Image: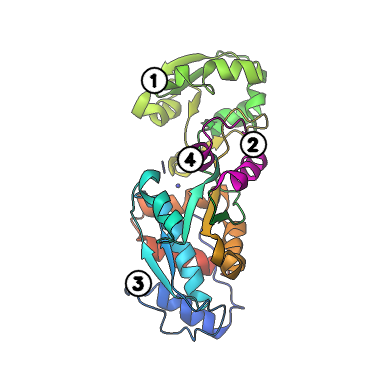
Amino acid sequence: MSTARTRATAFAALAAGAVLALTACSSGGDPLEPDAGDTGDTGDTGSVIVVGSQAYYSNEIIAEIYAQALENAGIEVERQFNIGQRDAYIPALESGEVNLFPEYSGNLLQYFDPETEARTADDVYAALGDALPEGLVVLDQSDATDQDSYTVTAAFADEWSLTTIADLANVTEPLTLGGPPELAERPYGPQGLLDVYGIEVGFSATGDTTVEDLVAGTVNVANVYTADPRIQTQDLVVLDDPEGLFLASNVVPVVSADIADEIADVINAVSVALTPEGLVALNVMSTEDEMSSADIAAQWLQENGL
């Protein structure tokens, strides 16, 4: 999975103390050290919030954004990044060893409820709240996603006026779908596309070269993750999925229930500001610009006035 960059101007109206805090965050110092410009008198929970992340660069960037946003609000933070996969970090969340974690709504819901029939973002989010174990809650989900999609080149989208998967029905030339070999048998593969949208496609098992084949025109529709940085760098368009062919997996903060109220305002503001295009941009800053997660987070927070 991978992401895209928008460079904006820092908000001039930031209070002087907030500017100092953001400058400290981006100075290249130890991200585990408390912010020297932070008085600790705003939103202080009186305890250390442990922020975790998966062993995945995009997830670590979001976790670092959470961590720095909390520090900028005067809350002491400890980082436990690169924990691994859900089998490793879910027990840490349940035990309280980790208090805050960026997750993906649909995939997390399936972890706790493999038989769920929820597919759309709102339905998945509602079901996830009920499926979480006692002691864990979710804060507001973001519009940003990291999930399967059907994606086309911008040129192909312009030629056929494509914005949603349903619009593929208006394409009069043969459609060939590219993706990993297992896509052929997945419920959202060619048969699912026919069942849900009435669209018939050929299939090409493109595997690791899916994006390259899409750009080259070997296939004209491709199964690409929505946070892949090549969406920006290769000028691709993710088609909207109004019928819920794919399981929605929005970025969502999972948090210990006993501190949720104390950090909700800070973390929910991050979720509001994090967009699908913005997450792709963050990933581009990592993969293309080779910036550290700490510097990416500091710049994003400053650009978004957080």
Q: Earlier in the sequence, mark 4 or mark 3?
A: 3
- Residue numbers of the magenta segment: 107-132
Query: Which SS class for mark 1?
Result: helix
Q: Nearer the viewer, mark 3 or mark 1?
A: 3
Marks 3 and 1: CB-CB under 8 Å?
A: no
- The image shows residue 102 at horizontal and vertical percentages of 48, 54
Question: In the figure, is residue 13 to the left or right of 235?
Answer: right
* Residues packed near mark 3 inside 10 Å, few (<14), some (14 to 19) or many (20 plus): few
Is 113 above or below relative to 97? above
Q: Earlier in the sequence, mark 4 or mark 1?
A: 1
User: Quick one: 41 or 88, which is closer to the camera?
Assistant: 88
Q: Residue at x 37, y 51 (%)?
A: 57
Residue tagged 2: 120
Marks 4 and 1: CB-CB under 8 Å?
A: no
- The image shows residue 118 at horizontal and vertical percentages of 62, 34
Whether 109 is among the magenta residues is yes
Query: Which SS class for mark 3?
Result: loop
Residue tagged 1: 181
